[in-house]
Image (cartoon, rainbow, N blue to C red):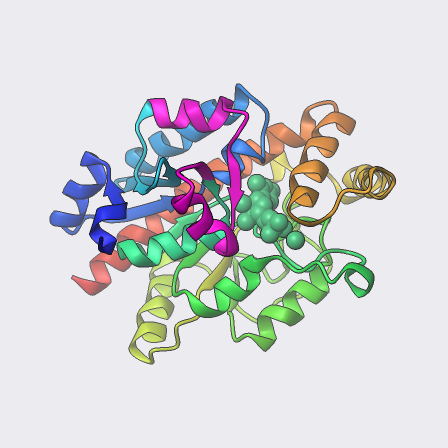
């Protein structure tokens, strides 16, 4: 068996590849483990629509019954949104889920690997994983960070959530040579809030400049990806003071429940939705839509630059 046998493109993505149209990758852990049903599937479909409206082709990625699917059908999205036995798949888990014929929702790390294999340069999500708070004790660092160091894919996100240790996450990325670029901002966005107190060293104000960075990074063979940090629109943000209290409470409950490892992020996300009375979910969905708009425009700009 070779790689072509296990990578399956949707018709839409296959055509886009043949015609060299701009393609935007999307992850599936956000569907299966990041949001509740039915908002998750609604979000997944609407995000794809936004990408199409902006002139690019969406490629949601997941592992389904022994294949890495690049571009999903509606029934795949429903399956990922509802099935109870969907595995959360990071780099470590990819080969196992393929070997066991399981259903896998890909994290940022695994989606980057698949995007690289498919030749897709731009990937849209909500937030990346990072260094967890209390890292000194747990050593919990998301595999997303190591992936950003070795897979040349631009990840458009709303920064890193305050459930993480934002300054240590930035330090880690700096060590690994991963540019974190504030899009029209000088400060690292904090997912639910448009701005954190942590200043970034790099900023771009338009997609053409972002596209040029990808171009030069490839030219140099640098291999690392990019974090394009796109703040949630002000009208949808949750102010720091408000969300910080909720996050602290969620972290206490996580500790009490003894949650660790790959279950940590999904637990905290669900807890924050519960404690915020659903408000965090609305913000989460809006910031994904906002990232989808920017990601499509970036894919178009990069496509133009390399044609
Ligand atoms: N942040 C979110 N929603 C998510 C995730 C992160 O706001 O769904 C998911 C992404 O798939 C990310 C993963 O790659 O959590 C990180 O998990 P971990 O910390 O276990 O690496
Ligand atoms: Mn972890």
Q: Which residues are magenta?
A: 75-104
Q: In the rendered image of this protein, does residue 218 appear above or below residue 44?
A: below
Where is residue 251? Give x, y as percent: 81, 43
Where is residue 87? Give x, y as percent: 52, 38
Count of numbered circles on the image? 0
Where is residue 292? Give x, y as percent: 42, 41
Q: In the current view of this chain or complex, which residue is farthest to the left?
A: 19
Nearer to us in this view, 235 or 240: 240
Q: In the rendered image of this protein, does residue 208 appear above or below residue 264?
A: below
| Residue under the image location 36 percent in, 74 percent down | 217
Is residue 111 a member of the stretch shown in magenta? no
Residue 301 visible at all = no
Where is residue 133? Give x, y as percent: 77, 56
| Residue under the image location 29 percent in, 35 percent down | 52
Q: Is residue 41 left or right of residue 54?
A: right
Which of the 4 quarters of the picture holds residue 145?
Answer: bottom right
Which of the 4 quarters of the picture holds residue 3?
Answer: bottom left
| Residue under the image location 51 percent in, 56 percent down | 92
Nearer to us in this view, 288 or 111: 111
Q: Is residue 73 left or right of residue 279?
A: left
């Amino acid at each position: 068996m070779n790689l072509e046998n296990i990578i399956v493109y949707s018709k839409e993505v296959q055509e886009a590849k043949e015609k060299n149209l701009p393609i935007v990758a999307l992850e599936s852990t956000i569907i299966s483990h990041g949001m509740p049903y039915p908002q998750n599937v609604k979000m997944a479909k609407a995000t794809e629509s936004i990408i199409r409206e902006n002139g690019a082709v969406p490629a949601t990625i997941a592992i389904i019954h022994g294949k890495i699917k690049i571009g999903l059908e509606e029934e795949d999205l429903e399956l990922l949104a509802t099935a109870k036995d969907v595995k959360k798949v990071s780099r470590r888990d990819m080969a196992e889920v393929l070997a066991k014929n399981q259903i896998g929702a890909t994290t940022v790390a695994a989606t980057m690997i698949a995007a690289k294999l498919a030749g897709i340069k731009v990937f849209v999500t909500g937030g990346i994983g990072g260094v967890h708070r209390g890292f000194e004790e747990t050593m919990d660092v998301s595999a997303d960070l190591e992936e950003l160091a070795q897979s040349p894919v631009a990840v458009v996100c709303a920064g890193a959530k305050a459930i993480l240790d934002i300054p240590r996450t930035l330090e880690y990325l700096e060590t690994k040579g991963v540019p974190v670029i504030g899009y029209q901002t000088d400060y690292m966005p904090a997912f639910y809030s448009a701005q954190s107190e942590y200043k970034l060293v790099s900023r771009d104000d338009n997609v053409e400049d972002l596209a040029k960075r990808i171009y030069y990074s490839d030219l140099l063979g640098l291999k690392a990806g990019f974090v394009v940090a796109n703040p949630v629109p002000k009208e949808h943000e949750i102010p720091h003071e408000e969300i910080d209290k909720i996050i602290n409470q969620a972290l206490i409950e996580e500790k009490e429940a003894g949650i660790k490892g790959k279950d940590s992020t999904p637990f905290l996300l669900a807890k924050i939705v519960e404690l915020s009375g659903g408000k965090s979910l609305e913000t989460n969905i809006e910031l994904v839509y906002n990232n989808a708009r920017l990601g499509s425009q970036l894919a178009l700009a990069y496509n133009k630059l390399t044609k």
